[in-house]
Amino acid sequence: MPIYKVSYVDHTQPGGGTITSQRTAPQVGEVVVLRSKPYRVIEVIELIPPRGGVHFLHATVEPTEEKTPPDPPDARVGF
């Protein structure tokens, strides 16, 4: 099963961001919760080719008020 290392950056805030390890790739339009706040994914870019089953992605996000159901227990790893 692949692992996705995802760098999430909120384009409305200078500096900072979050890096996660998860079992599914983020999708444009998806709502994710980062640091207890909901964000909508607006762009996903592959940073480098996968290595040994690990994919390296960058996701640009923006704040949203929309709620999202919690991830299933095995969806995100390494927290």
Image: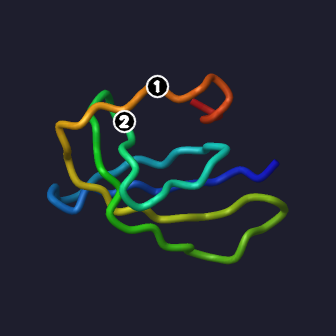
Q: Is residue 79 above or below residue 8?
A: above
Between 26 and 10, the residue placed more toward the observer is 26
Percent coordinates x, y for residue 77 in the rendering: 65, 34
Query: Vertical placement of 42 versus 5: above or below?
Result: below
Q: Answer yes or no: do the residues labelled 2 and 1 have beta carbons within 8 Å? A: yes
* Distance Cα–Cα, label 2 vs label 1: 9 Å
Vertical arrangement, residue 7 with respect to residue 22, above or below: below
Picture disc at residue 8: none
Q: Quadrant of residue 62?
A: bottom left
Tell me how many marks there are: 2
Q: Would residue 59 be found to the left or right of residue 20 on screen?
A: left
Disc 2 is placed on an element classified as strand
Q: Earlier in the sequence, mark 2 or mark 1?
A: 2
SS category of the residue bearing label 1: loop
Residue 31 location (% of width, % of height): 36, 44
Residue 35, position in %: x, y?
33, 32
Which residue is nearer to you in this view: 35 or 25?
A: 25
With 2 as the anchor, is 7 left or right in this view?
left
Residue 70 is tagged as: 1
Q: Residue at x 15, y 59 (%)?
A: 12
Q: Residue at x 36, y 56 (%)?
A: 29
Q: Amino acid at mark 2?
A: Val
Residue 53 x/y as whole percent: 81, 59
Residue drawn where x is 60% and y is 35% of the image: 76
Q: In which image quadrant can residue 43 be found?
A: bottom left
Pointer 1 local density, CA inside 10 Å: few below 14, some 14–19, many at least 20: few
Point out the frontmost of discs 2 and 1: 1
Badge number at residue 33: 2
